[in-house]
Amino acid sequence: MHQVNPVIWSDAVAANAQEYANTTLKSGEMKHADTYSLQPPAGPAGENLAKFSSPQGAEAIVSAW
C-alpha cells in the first residue's frame, strides 16, 4: 500500500536492542536512547516506548498506546 520494501532482520539492530535491554531495562527504568545518532547499519532509528499495565490486559494497553 505504501510501496516500501519488506522488513528484514538486522543483526546490528538486534544487537543494539539487546544492549539497551541489558543495561537500561535491567535497572527498571525505561528511557529513550540516542538512536538517531547511531551509525548504519544499526541506525539511525526511532523508538516507540510504552510502559503501561492494565487489569483489562494487553488489548487495553494497545488501545492506550
Image (cartoon, rainbow, N blue to C red):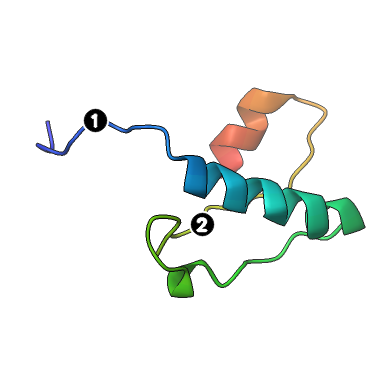
Mark 1 sits on what residue?
6
Q: Quadrant of residue 45?
A: bottom left
Report the side of 52 relative to 48 (left or right). Answer: right
The image quadrant of residue 33 is: bottom right
Number of marks drawn: 2
| Amino acid type at image mark 2 | Glu
Element under disc 2: loop
Asked if residue 10 is positioned above or below residue 39 in the image, the reply reads above
Residue at numbered disc 2: 47
State the residue in front, 39 or 29: 39
Q: Position of residue 52 (x, y in %)?
A: 74, 45
The residue at 51%/66% (across/down) is 35
Q: Quadrant of the C terminus?
A: top right
Of the pair 38 and 51, the residue shown nearer to us:
38
In the rendering, at what x and y percent does residue 3 appear? 9, 36
| CA distance separating discs 1 and 2 | 19 Å
Residue 41 image offset from top left, x and y in percent = 39, 55
Image position of 38 (left or right of 56)? left
Return the disc, 1 or 2, that comes first in the chain's sequence: 1
Q: Residues within 10 Å of mark 2 (few under 14, many from 20)?
A: few
